[in-house]
Amino acid sequence: MTEADKILIVGGLLTLTYGALLGYPMIALRMRAGNPPTPRYLTVTHVGAVLQGVILFGLVFAARLSSLSSGWNVTAAWLVVVSGILIAAKDTINWLSGVGDEFADKARTAPLGLAGALTMTIGLVIFIVGDLSAL
């Protein structure tokens, strides 16, 4: 197992665990009198973290197929893990601060979203280059 594999697996497990743990506040909120709807960004954070965890597990195969050096694969792995952290942080802050729509409300978390999108894109491009060159 390579270092990139380990980064992706541990990152995936931690991200998936965070997403699963967010189910508890969802349940607590829904059990209140009147059965209120779940806040939008609580749902977004929960689902996003679960999906990001699964994506990280899947990228283990991309890291294994890659013909790039270990350094490039480790860099790509860290970039996609950091992306998930940034996006989960953005959505968590949006939930806790009561943001209804981050774009309409011009939420101050936009830099986290942009950084998360950029790090994910760069990490995926590295894996794509490595995988296509291996074929």
Image (cartoon, rainbow, N blue to C red):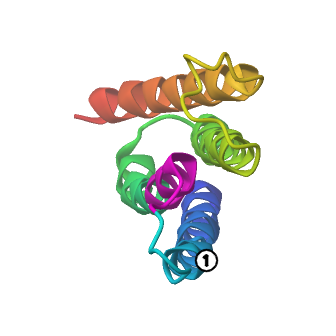
In the image, 58 versus 131, the foreground residue is 58
- Residue 13, position in %: x, y? 57, 72
| Residue 75 forms part of the magenta stretch | no
- Residue 47, position in %: x, y? 43, 58
For the point 55% across and 67% down, the residue is 19
For the point 68% across and 40% down, the residue is 94
In this view, 120 is above or below 46? above
For the point 51% across and 61% down, the residue is 46
Main secondary structure found in the magenta portion: helix
| Residue 47 forms part of the magenta stretch | yes
Amino acid under disc 1:
Leu
Q: Which residue is mark 1?
A: 21
Mark 1 surroundings: few (<14), some (14-19) or many (≥20) residues within 10 A:
few
Tell me the SS state at disc 1: helix
In the image, 102 versus 6, the foreground residue is 102
In this view, 39 is above or below 132? below
Would you say 118 lies left or right of 66 here?
right
In the image, 21 versus 70, the foreground residue is 21
In this view, 11 is above or below 31? above
